[in-house]
Image: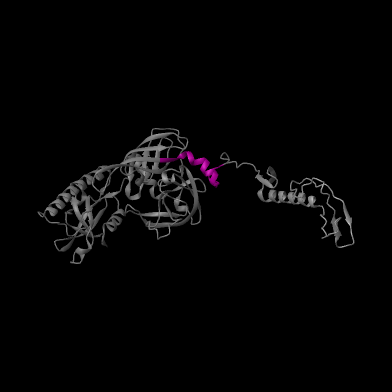
């Protein structure tokens, strides 16, 4: 057995980890298992340190070699010593170089390349709007969303719900420049809107083919979640296609489902495929009711397929509205469940008819209940909207109505929807609301009746 005599007068670091060789010590071979000190007290044998320093150096070199193999760029060891035993390790590698010059059309890109190439084509949108509180008083508020440049001369696409009711719209770019924007037009049913800013030479996105997407394909979005974390990149996969989703606005839409993180403020942003092409407009996220007893829902985001709205975007730019979209020219609401218990059929109750509309020309009257469209049964205004949505302006459509205890058919030649028609229906809605408020006041004073037993008092819907 080997053991050594240590000289206490030598000043030596027994815990040397720096890789410097420890000075050699004198070792002697003894046959006795115990060494007797000068005081006569037996001491236990000490094991010989076989090239301990060499092992430490070798271990350090092995770790450095392994770190170099695993990390690719190598890991260099001790750079600082704090006290006698504390060591800080710093990694060294070449910085990530995002090469955008090598990107070619039709070739897949990395997430970094997509961001570097298109972040300057993505915008943050801030709006000022006036709303009505629960007491009927107008209040001012603000909303934030996202969008993307679709042409170099300043046309920008976003969601309709981002700019709905806005009194002013501002658009900001990643370089800090901002512009006042005007609303060219919007399509509420498909949640798409086009803005215009006074600028030229802008970097525009490239539109892709959303029909060619497959489940599992990688997708990315750049947006402004929460309206504060501006120009954030998130990624995910196409989780499903052709999802039928009912939005908070009550619109039923065809959507792409993705697990890409989509939050408030992302609405209106672009959904890119791996080739940097816009294949969707991020629009919605499924969430829980907000109850603390329910787990929050993650990874369920939705985007409008770009193929569904390409033609609408072009129409809005060229005409200010979506051409060919049908309009009936009525205000309507659902028949109440209480009325159906007395033999009144379910359907869309006609509250008012717009003068000069196809509804008036076709013979529809206030109080009619629309029960079917071209033979397809209708039990709600959503079903009526869905049926008419399949038609085009100029189509002849047969409406089956319930009037005075019996059903009859009326033929309507559908009008084309446009902003003037929407404004006229809005004015008619305001007039109807005033009549309702007056009726409520009369009812409360005991001088009138509630009326309108067929419909869900007091909400209406223009179409």
Which percent across, then down, holds residue 373? 25, 59
Which percent across, then down, holds residue 392? 30, 51
Q: Residue furthest front?
A: 39
Q: Quadrant of residue 365?
A: bottom left
Which percent across, then down, holds residue 145? 40, 44
Q: Is residue 106 magenta?
A: yes
Residue 149 in view in this figure: no
Is residue 141 shown above or below 341?
A: above
Q: How many marks?
A: 0
Q: Is residue 151 left or right of residue 70?
A: left
Q: 179 or 129, which lies in front?
A: 129
Q: Is residue 46 left or right of residue 234?
A: right
Is residue 214 shown above or below 434?
A: below
Span shown in magenta: 103-124
Q: 196 or 417, which lies in front?
A: 196
Quadrant where the image shows the N terminus: bottom right
Is residue 126 shown above or below 216?
A: above
Q: Residue at x 82, y 54 (%)?
A: 50
Q: Residue furthest left?
A: 447
The colour style of the image is one colour
Q: 177 or 282, which lies in front?
A: 177
Q: Is residue 369 magenta?
A: no
Q: Quadrant of residue 130?
A: top left
Q: Is residue 254 left or right of residue 454?
A: right
Which percent across, then down, holds residue 302? 42, 53
Residue 143 in view in this figure: yes
């Amino acid at each position: 057995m080997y053991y050594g005599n240590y000289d206490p007068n030598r000043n030596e670091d027994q815990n040397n980890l720096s890789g410097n060789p420890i000075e050699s010590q004198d070792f002697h071979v003894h046959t006795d298992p115990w060494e007797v000190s000068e005081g006569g007290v037996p001491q236990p044998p000490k094991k010989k340190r076989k090239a301990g320093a060499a092992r430490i150096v070798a271990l350090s070199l092995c770790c450095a070699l392994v770190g170099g193999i695993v990390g690719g760029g190598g890991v260099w060891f001790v750079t600082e010593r704090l006290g006698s035993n504390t060591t800080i390790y710093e990694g060294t590698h070449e910085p990530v170089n995002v090469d955008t010059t090598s990107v070619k059309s039709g070739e897949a890109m990395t997430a970094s390349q997509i961001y570097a190439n298109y972040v300057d084509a993505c915008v943050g949108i801030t709006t000022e709007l006036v709303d009505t509180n629960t007491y009927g008083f107008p209040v001012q508020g603000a909303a934030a969303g996202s969008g993307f440049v679709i042409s170099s001369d300043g046309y920008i696409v976003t969601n309709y719900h981002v700019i709905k009711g806005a009194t002013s719209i501002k658009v900001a770019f990643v370089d800090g420049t901002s512009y006042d924007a005007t609303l060219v037009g919007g399509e509420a049913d498909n949640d798409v809107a086009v803005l215009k800013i006074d600028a030229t030479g802008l970097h525009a996105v490239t539109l892709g083919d959303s029909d060619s997407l497959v489940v599992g394909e990688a997708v990315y979005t750049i947006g402004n979640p929460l309206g504060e974390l501006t120009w954030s990149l998130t990624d995910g996969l196409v989780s499903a296609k052709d999802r039928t989703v009912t939005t908070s606005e009550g619109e039923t839409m065809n959507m792409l489902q993705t697990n890409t993180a989509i939050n408030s403020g992302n609405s209106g942003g672009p959904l890119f495929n791996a080739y940097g092409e816009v294949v969707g407009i991020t629009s919605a996220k499924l969430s829980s009711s907000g109850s603390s007893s329910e787990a929050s829902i993650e990874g369920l985001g939705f985007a409008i397929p770009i193929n569904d709205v390409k033609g609408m975007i072009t129409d809005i730019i060229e005409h200010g509205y979506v051409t060919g979209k049908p309009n009936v020219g009525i205000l309507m609401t659902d028949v109440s469940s209480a009325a159906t218990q007395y033999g009144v059929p379910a359907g869309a109750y006609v509250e008012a008819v717009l003068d000069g509309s196809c509804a008036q020309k076709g013979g529809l009257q206030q109080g009619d209940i629309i029960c079917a469209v071209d033979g397809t049964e209708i039990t709600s205004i959503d079903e009526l909207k869905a049926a008419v949505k399949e038609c085009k302006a100029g189509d002849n459509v047969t409406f089956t109505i319930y009037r005075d205890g019996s059903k009859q058919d009326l033929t309507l030649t559908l009008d084309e929807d446009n902003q003037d028609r929407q404004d006229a229906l809005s004015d008619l809605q305001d007039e109807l609301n005033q009549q309702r408020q007056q009726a409520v006041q009369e009812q409360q004073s005991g001088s009138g009746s509630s009326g309108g037993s067929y419909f869900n008092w007091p909400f209406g819907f223009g179409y």
